[in-house]
Image: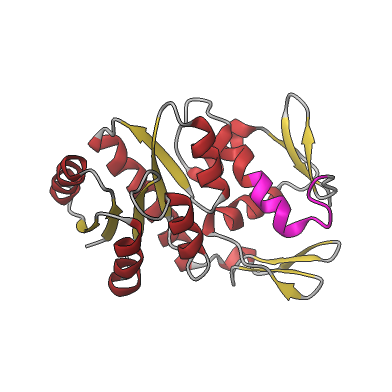
Amino acid sequence: MHKVLFIEDDDAIRLALRLALEDEGYEVVEAHDGASGLVQFGQCQPDVVLLDLRLPDLSGFEVCKAMRSSSTVPIIMVTAQTEAADMVAGLEAGADDYITKPVVPKVLSARIAAVLRRVSYESLGDQNHDEVLRFGDLELRREQGVVTKAGEELSLTRTEFRMLCEFAEHADAVLSRDQLLDHVWGYEYLGDSRLVDAHVRRLRLKIEDTPDDPQRIVTVRGLGYRLIS
């Protein structure tokens, strides 16, 4: 049984979604604010975190950053449809995915199942991708899940690592946002490119010498992104 940590201050929402997820076979651990969420995070070791951005004490951004400092566990943000800027900021804080309120339980369950499939796939390893891929001073070891830059290991989230692998497998080819959504996240997002753009920005911060003037992952206007070999 997979364990979901649900951090949400609205009691009614928390109860409704907990019952819906339990019907889908998940074990749900609840927290009503950021501080207690971080305590539960350290104690229960969840498989997925469902994190509301609007919390009464710590912000969801602070909670996300604190989790990311020690873990690559998948984090799905919950945000209002009108909070586009918050959604992007949450992704840039380290969240892997997002879902908007009002949350449809079946959609939420599908999102959780998708991130768990990705984690399961990565844990199996891939014997066909055990070579070292090099791009300048950047080295990617897919089987080990390791990326180094000038010999220093980088701390990437699972989603960032999957995105970099996708670019590496198609070096010098232009990948559209729709292709990245399909191959990295594994399901349709109805053309919401903000998810891709936010993760590209985070990835550039970690692998580029000058993220504001990227030389490795470049934007191809009107088409998508390309990794320069």
From the image, give the main secondary structure of the stretch colored magenta.
Answer: helix
Please give the count of numbered marks on the rendered protein: 0
Q: Position of residue 229 (x, y in %)?
A: 84, 52
31, above or below 146, in the image: above
194, above or below 89, in the image: above
Query: Does residue 196 appear in the picture of this structure?
Result: yes
Image quadrant where residue 44 sits: bottom left
The residue most toward the front is 57
User: Which residue shows up at 77% across the image and 40% down it?
Assistant: 173
Quadrant where the image shows the N terminus: bottom left
Q: Nearer the viewer, residue 66 or 153?
A: 66
Tell me if 92 is positioned left or right of 102 in this view: right
Question: Which range of residues does the magenta coloring cover?
Answer: 200-212
Tell me if 197 is positioned left or right of 113 in this view: right
What colour scheme does the image use? secondary structure
Image quadrant where residue 57 sits: bottom left
Q: Nearer the viewer, residue 152 or 2?
A: 152
Residue 204 within the segment the image draws in magenta: yes
Q: Position of residue 104 (x, y in %)?
A: 26, 32
